[in-house]
Image (cartoon, rainbow, N blue to C red):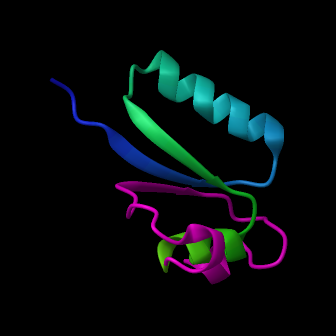
Amino acid sequence: MKQVIDILLAEDNPDDIEITKRALKNANVINRLYVARDGEEALNFLYNKGDGENKPKPDLILLDINMPKVNGIEAA
């Protein structure tokens, strides 16, 4: 039995989000994908603040570098 992987995708481009979803599906990765549209949302998710409350800690983080508010480098 495969383990479910919790993935946080920090990405503001809707096309890149769809490409990532398709790639994970094609690779047969069993996952729960959580999407943050900017670095601030990603940090809230990771620190269980705001809309990120009661979310699991991700097993994998895919982080875009160029995002609004807080960019990927600042969020890392």
Quadrant in the rendering for residue 51 = bottom right
Say which residue appears at 21% left-offset and 27% top-offset.
2
- The spot of residue 50 in percent (x, y) is 64, 77
Which quadrant holds the N terminus?
Answer: top left
Nearest to the observer: residue 54 or residue 72 = 54
Farthest front residue? 54
Determine whether, in the image, residue 3 is placed left or right of residue 12: left
Say which residue appears at 78% left-offset and 64% top-offset.
66
Q: Magenta part of the protein: which range?
A: 48-76
Determine whether, in the image, residue 37 is placed left or right of residue 35: right
Quadrant in the rendering for residue 65 = bottom right
Q: Is residue 69 magenta?
A: yes
Determine whether, in the image, residue 28 is placed left or right of residue 25: left
- The spot of residue 6 in percent (x, y) is 40, 48
Which quadrant holds the C terminus?
Answer: bottom right
Seen in the picture, residue 63 relative to 6 is either above or below; the reply is below
Seen in the picture, residue 33 relative to 74 is either above or below; the reply is above
Seen in the picture, residue 51 relative to 31 is either above or below; the reply is below
Seen in the picture, residue 34 relative to 16 is either above or below; the reply is below
Count how many numbered circles sit on residues in the image.
Answer: 0
Quadrant in the rendering for residue 63 = bottom right
Say which residue appears at 46% left-offset and 49% top-offset.
7
Nearest to the observer: residue 54 or residue 36 = 54
- The spot of residue 9 in percent (x, y) is 59, 52
- The spot of residue 29 in percent (x, y) is 38, 28
